Image (cartoon, rainbow, N blue to C red):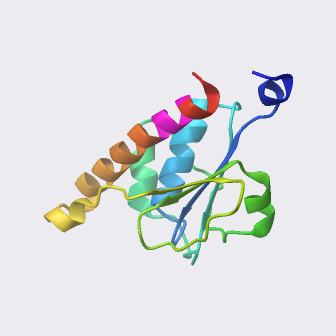
Amino acid sequence: MTEETTLKKPAVLFVCSKNGGKSQLAAGLLRDLAGDTVTVHSAGTKPGKSLNPQAVESLAELGIGVEGEHPKPVTDDVLDTVDAVIVLGTEAKLEPREGKRFEIWETDEPSERGIEGMERMRLVRDDIRTRVQALYTELTGK
């Protein structure tokens, strides 16, 4: 590892369409896991008005708070500063940026199997949690 890579903190942007559910779940999970070792952003391609209450509750079940978070639009400023852009689900459409890690996570969608409510949200959260843990390991080597 070069000195530069050990000094630069990786930065990630999680994107979904409304920035109320999946991208907020991913951001909350990574912040909890990484502490201050990774800079975490979340945004939406068509931001909603508020966070999904079930997403907030599913994080609270793990002791993760998202106070102060709100849906935000994707901005060039944030896109320019991050190392990785992770799009959650298939609704949000975003063009890859040259030189940036770009991934689309087609997350579990339990509603397609008739699973709704908090049971659905826990399954979505746990799917995202597994992916976030793998991403954290790739970014930090931990």
As drawn, 10 above or below 50 = above
Residue that protrudes farthest toward the front in the picture: 98
| Residue at screen point 58% across, 71% down | 94
**Whole-percent x and y of residue 82?**
73, 51
Quarter of the image for the N terminus: give it: top right
One can see residue 61 in this view:
no
Going 67% across and 69% down the picture, which residue do you hit? Answer: 74
Q: Which of these two is toward me, 100 or 106?
A: 100
Segment tinted magenta in the rendering: 132-137
Quarter holding residue 39:
top right
Tell whether 96 sits left or right of 99.
Answer: left
Q: Is residue 70 left or right of residue 76?
A: left
Asked which quadrant contains residue 102, the reply is bottom right
Asked if residue 135 is among those painted magenta in the image, a careful observer would answer: yes
Q: Looking at the picture, how far across and down is residue 46, in whole percent? A: 57, 78
Magenta stretch contains residue 110: no
Dominant SS type (magenta): helix
Up the image or down, 132 lies above or below 25; here it is: above
Percent x, y for residue 36? Answer: 71, 32
For residue 9, side relative to residue 122 (left or right):
right
Q: Quadrant of residue 71?
A: bottom right
Q: Position of residue 61 (x, y in %)?
A: 39, 40
Q: Name above or below for residue 45 compared with residue 127.
A: below
Residue ID at (62%, 34%): 139
